[in-house]
Image (tube, coloured by chain):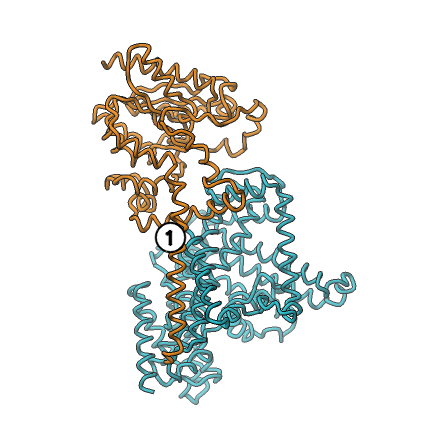
C-alpha cells in the first residue's frame, strides 16, 4: 500500500466532507428562517400562553378565510359575553394534522372549540402534509398513543430527532432556490408569503381575489367528481377527530362542529347523496352538536369553489356568533 | 503471497457478513451455490470422458438452477398450473409458498453458472483455492444487484495482492459519489412521481402517462446504473475491476445497440450462454428470430416471475427481430430516406429507438395487464387533454401545472426539443469538440474528473457531496434491481 502518496487524497476527502457539510448546514439554517414565520409553527407559541375561557376555531383555510374572529368577538361583547375568539385555521388542516396540537390546546385551557369541517377533512383518501407533522416534532412532545393513528412513516416524522429534522429540511431547498433564484420572489415560499401579514390569530385571510361565476366554473376539473370520497366506514381521520373530541370533553372544553359552506357550483358537481349521507352520519356519530352551513350561501358569497369572500365571511361569522351566544348562555 | 491470502480471506469474511446483514440465513444458500459450482468445476475439468463430463455439467446446472427456480419461479409456475382448468370453471388451488426471494440470487447464481459453463467449454481453468472462488461469487460490491461478473474477468485479478494506489482511490471515490448522485438525487426524487402516476394510471391523461414513462426510464437507469457505479467504485478503491454495465443506453440508435449498452453483463450473458448455443444467427432467418425471441423471453423472465416481465422480454425480442429485418433492407431504406446515414438521420434513429424502448418501460413498470394496456394506449394514441389532475404529490403537481400547463406546454416542448438537439449534437460531434479542447464531452468523464489535479478534484468532490446532501430525496426506496 502506497500510504504516502494516498495521504493527500485522504486529506482532500476529509476537507471536502467538512466543507460540504458546513455549507449544507449553513444553507439549511438560512432556509429554516422561512419556516419560523409559518402559522403552523408559531401556533405553538400561541398555545403556550394561557387562554382561560377563550374560544378557539379550528379548521382549514375554509375557516382561516371564512370566519372573522374579531366580528364574532364584538358580537358576543355586545351581548355581554366577554370572551376572546381566535381563528386558528391552517391551510389544508385535517383532524390527523391537528392531533399533535391537542395536548397544547388543552393545556392553554380554552372554554370552547369550534371545529370547521368539510368532506376533505375526513376523506378516506386524505393524504397528510408531511411538513406539518415534521414541524410538530420540533414544537411539542408526541403522545406515544398517537402511533395508532398514523402510518409508521408518518409517526417517524412526528417523533424525529433534531438531527433527523435538520436533514429533513433539505427538502425545502429546491423550493427556496426556485423562489429566490428562478422567480426572485423573496425569501418566502410562494404559497405562504401572505400568511405572515399579521399573526394575531384573529384576523381572517383577506388576500384572495373574487373570481367571476364563469371563472369559478372554469376551475371545475373532471377529477373533482371523485375527490375526497367519504365512505360509511372508519378511517384514521375520523378516529383522530373522535379522539380529539373525547380529549376536549374530558377536560371540560365544549366542542361544536361546523359543516363549512361550500360553493353550490362545486357541491352540485362533486357531492352526491351517498357522500353527503355518510358525512352527516359520521358527524351524528360524534355525539357532538353540529351545524350544517354547507348549502347556506350562494356562489356570490365565495371567492372560488370553497372559500368565502368578505360578504360571505360576514354572514357566516354573524351566524356563528348567534350559535356561540346560544350555546354559552346555556352553559353559563 | 501470504499477505494476499490474508487480504482475500478478510474480503471474503466481510462479504459474507455483508450478505448476512442483508439476507440473514440465506447466506447458507450462497455457500451452497458456491460449493456446488466449485466442485462441479473441479469434476468437469478432471474428467476426460466427454459423456461423463456432460452429465456432471447438466447435473451441476440443474443443482444451481433449482434454488433460483424454487425461490423465484415456483409460485409463478404454480399460479399458472392452478389456472389451467379455469375454462371448465375449476381452480386447482395448489398451495402457494410464502417464500422470500433472497436478495441477489439471480446475480450470484448466474456468476456461478458462467464459471461452470466456461470450464466445460475449456475457456478458463478451474480455480485452485476455494476461498478465492468463494470471494469471486460473494464479493460484496456485485453480490446484491450486479454486474454479473464472470470468472475469467475476476479471478485473474485475485492472483495479486490488493494495493490502494492514488489513481484508483480517486477514481473509486468519484465513481461512488457519482452513483450516489444518480440514486439519491435523481432516481429517488423521481420515484414518488412515477409511483403516483402508475399506482392508478387509469386516472391520468396521456400527458401524465408520457411524463410518467419518461420519468420511469430515467429512474430505472439512474437507480440501476447508480448502484453499478457504487459497486464499481467500491471495487476500484482496492484496485479490483468489475465490468461496466451501462454505456449511454438512451443514445442507442437501434434496439440491438440498446442491448449492447443496457445491462451489458446480463445481455452478454444471455448472448453467450443462451442465444449463441441455440444457434444464434447461423441457422437461417426463422431460427434466428426464434432464438432472439426465446432469449429475450428468458431475459424478461430473469427480471421477475410476472407476466409483465415476460411481455417486456417478448416485446424486446420482437424489436430485435424487426431491427434485423430492417437492417437487411438497409439498401432500399437508404434509397427512400437518403439522409438516414447523416447526422440528422442519426438523431431520428435515436428518437425512434427510444420511443419504442420507453414504450417497453410501460410493460416493465405496470404489473396489471389492463392498466398496462391503458397506459400503452395513452402513450401511443395521445388524447391531447392538457388539464391538471391534483395528485397530492407536490413535485408532480408543480411540474405538470406550473411548468407544463401554466407555463405553457408549447414552451416546455420547445425547450425539451432544444435540449435534446443540443445534447445530440454534442454527442454526435463530440470528437470534433474534443479536438477543439472541450474535454468534458469525453466518453469517460469520471476518468476525466479523477485525473484532475488534486485541488480541482477536491472542488468536484465537495460539490458532489454538497449536491447529495442538499437534493437527495427525503426517503430512499431500495434499489429496483434488488428484487431481481
Q: Chain of mark 1?
A: A
Question: At x 37% / y 79%, what residue is drawn?
Answer: A4
* Circle 1 residue: A25
Note whether B474 is above or below A68 in the view shown: below
Mark 1 closeness class: few <14, some 14–19, many ≥20 residues within 10 Å: some
Q: Is residue B422 left or right of residue A312?
A: right
Q: Position of residue B194 (x, y in %)?
A: 49, 49
What color was chain A assigned in the picture?
orange
Q: Observer-nearest residue: A18 or A208?
A: A18
The answer to whether residue B202 is seen in the rendering is no
Q: Residue drawn at (31%, 51%), measured in percent from left and top?
A: A163
Q: Looking at the picture, how far across and down is residue B155, in whole percent?
A: 42, 80
| Direction from residue B282 to residue A125 in the image, left or right | left
* Residue A247 position in % (x across, y down): 24, 29
**Viewer can see residue A266:** yes
> Residue B4: x and y, percent?
34, 83
Q: Is residue B167 above or below residue A196?
A: below
Task: Assign a secondary structure to mark 1.
Answer: helix
Colour applied to chain B: cyan
Q: Which of A286 and A191 lies nearest the eye of the viewer?
A: A191
Residue at image location 38% in from the left, 42% down from the top: A131
Task: Establish if B242 lies above or below B378.
Answer: below
Quadrant of res B16: bottom left
A221 or A324, which is in the foreground? Answer: A324
Amino acid at each position: 500500500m502506497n500510504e504516502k502518496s494516498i495521504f493527500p487524497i485522504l486529506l482532500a476527502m476529509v476537507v471536502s466532507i467538512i466543507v460540504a457539510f458546513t455549507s449544507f448546514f449553513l444553507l439549511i439554517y438560512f432556509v429554516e428562517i422561512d419556516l419560523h414565520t409559518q402559522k403552523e409553527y408559531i401556533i405553538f407559541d400561541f398555545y403556550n400562553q394561557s387562554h382561560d375561557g377563550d374560544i378557539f376555531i379550528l379548521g382549514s383555510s375554509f375557516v382561516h378565510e371564512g370566519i372573522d374572529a374579531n366580528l364574532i368577538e364584538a358580537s358576543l361583547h355586545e351581548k355581554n359575553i366577554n370572551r376572546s375568539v381566535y381563528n386558528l385555521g391552517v391551510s389544508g388542516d385535517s383532524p390527523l394534522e391537528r392531533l399533535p396540537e391537542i395536548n397544547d390546546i388543552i393545556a392553554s385551557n380554552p372554554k370552547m372549540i369550534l371545529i370547521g369541517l368539510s368532506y376533505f377533512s375526513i376523506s378516506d383518501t386524505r393524504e397528510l402534509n408531511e411538513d406539518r407533522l415534521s414541524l410538530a416534532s420540533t414544537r411539542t412532545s408526541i403522545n406515544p398513543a398517537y402511533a395508532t393513528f398514523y402510518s409508521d412513516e408518518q409517526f417517524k416524522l412526528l417523533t424525529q430527532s433534531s438531527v433527523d429534522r435538520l436533514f429533513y429540511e433539505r427538502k425545502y431547498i429546491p423550493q427556496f432556490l426556485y423562489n429566490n433564484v428562478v422567480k426572485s420572489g423573496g425569501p418566502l415560499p410562494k404559497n405562504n408569503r401572505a400568511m405572515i401579514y399579521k399573526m394575531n390569530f384573529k384576523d381572517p385571510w383577506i388576500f384572495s381575489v373574487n373570481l367571476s361565476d364563469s371563472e369559478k366554473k372554469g376551475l371545475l376539473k373532471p377529477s373533482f367528481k371523485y375527490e375526497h370520497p367519504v365512505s360509511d366506514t372508519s378511517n384514521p381521520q375520523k378516529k383522530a377527530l373522535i379522539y380529539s373530541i373525547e380529549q376536549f370533553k374530558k377536560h371540560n372544553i365544549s366542542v361544536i362542529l361546523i359543516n363549512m359552506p361550500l360553493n353550490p357550483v362545486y357541491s352540485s358537481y362533486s357531492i352526491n347523496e351517498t357522500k353527503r349521507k355518510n358525512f352527516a352520519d359520521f358527524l351524528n356519530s360524534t355525539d357532538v352538536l353540529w351545524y350544517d352551513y354547507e348549502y347556506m350561501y350562494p356562489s356570490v358569497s365565495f371567492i372560488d369553489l370553497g372559500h368565502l369572500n368578505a360578504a360571505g365571511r360576514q354572514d357566516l361569522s354573524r351566524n356563528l356568533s348567534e350559535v356561540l351566544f346560544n350555546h354559552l348562555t346555556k352553559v353559563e | 503471497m501470504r499477505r494476499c491470502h490474508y487480504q482475500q480471506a478478510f474480503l471474503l469474511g466481510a462479504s459474507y457478513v455483508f450478505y448476512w446483514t442483508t439476507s440473514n440465513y440465506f447466506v447458507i444458500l450462497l455457500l451452497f451455490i458456491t460449493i456446488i459450482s466449485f466442485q462441479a468445476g473441479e469434476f468437469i475439468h478432471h474428467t476426460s470422458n466427454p459423456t461423463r463430463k456432460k452429465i456432471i455439467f447438466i447435473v451441476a446446472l440443474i443443482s444451481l438452477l433449482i434454488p433460483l427456480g424454487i425461490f423465484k419461479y415456483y409460485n409463478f409456475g404454480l399460479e399458472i398450473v392452478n389456472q389451467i382448468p379455469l375454462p371448465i370453471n375449476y381452480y386447482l388451488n395448489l398451495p402457494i409458498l410464502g417464500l422470500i426471494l433472497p436478495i441477489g440470487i439471480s446475480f450470484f447464481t448466474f456468476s456461478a453458472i458462467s464459471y461452470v459453463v466456461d470450464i466445460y467449454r475449456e475457456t478458463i481453468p478451474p480455480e485452485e483455492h476455494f476461498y478465492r472462488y468463494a470471494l469471486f461469487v460473494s464479493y460484496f460490491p456485485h453480490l446484491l444487484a450486479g454486474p454479473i461478473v464472470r470468472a475469467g474477468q475476476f479471478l485473474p485479478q485475485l492472483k495479486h495482492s490488493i494495493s490502494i494506489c492514488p489513481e484508483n482511490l480517486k477514481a473509486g471515490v468519484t465513481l461512488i459519489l457519482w452513483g450516489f448522485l444518480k440514486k439519491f438525487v435523481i432516481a429517488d426524487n423521481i420515484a414518488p412521481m412515477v409511483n403516483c402516476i402508475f399506482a392508478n394510471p387509469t386516472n391520468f391523461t396521456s400527458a401524465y402517462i408520457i411524463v410518467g414513462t419518461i420519468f420511469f426510464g430515467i429512474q430505472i437507469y439512474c437507480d440501476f446504473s447508480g448502484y453499478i457505479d457504487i459497486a464499481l467504485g467500491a471495487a476500484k478503491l482496492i484496485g479490483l475491476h468489475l465490468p461496466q454495465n451501462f454505456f449511454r443506453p438512451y443514445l442507442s440508435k437501434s434496439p440491438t445497440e440498446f442491448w449492447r449498452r443496457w445491462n451489458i453483463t446480463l445481455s452478454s450473458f444471455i448472448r453467450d450462454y443462451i442465444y449463441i448455443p441455440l444457434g444464434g444467427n447461423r441457422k437461417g432467418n426463422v431460427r434466428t428470430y426464434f432464438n432472439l425471441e426465446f432469449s429475450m423471453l428468458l431475459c424478461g423472465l430473469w427480471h421477475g416471475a410476472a407476466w409483465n416481465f415476460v411481455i417486456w422480454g417478448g416485446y424486446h425480442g420482437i424489436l430485435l427481430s424487426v431491427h434485423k429485418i430492417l437492417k437487411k433492407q438497409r439498401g432500399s431504406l437508404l434509397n427512400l430516406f437518403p439522409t438516414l446515414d447523416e447526422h440528422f438521420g442519426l438523431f431520428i434513429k435515436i428518437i425512434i429507438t427510444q420511443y419504442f424502448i420507453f414504450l417497453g418501460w410501460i410493460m416493465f413498470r405496470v404489473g396489471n395487464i389492463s392498466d398496462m394496456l391503458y397506459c400503452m394506449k395513452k402513450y401511443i394514441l395521445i388524447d391531447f387533454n392538457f388539464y391538471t389532475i391534483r395528485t397530492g404529490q407536490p413535485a408532480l403537481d408543480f411540474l405538470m401545472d406550473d411548468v407544463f400547463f401554466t407555463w405553457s406546454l408549447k414552451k416546455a416542448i420547445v425547450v425539451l426539443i432544444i435540449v435534446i438537439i443540443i445534447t445530440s449534437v454534442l454527442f454526435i460531434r463530440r470528437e470534433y469538440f474534443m479536438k477543439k479542447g472541450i474535454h468534458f464531452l469525453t466518453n469517460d468523464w469520471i476518468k476525466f474528473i479523477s485525473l484532475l489535479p488534486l485541488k480541482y478534484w477536491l472542488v468536484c468532490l465537495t460539490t458532489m457531496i454538497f449536491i447529495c446532501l442538499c437534493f437527495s430525496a427525503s426517503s430512499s426506496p431500495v434499489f429496483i434491481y434488488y428484487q431481481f
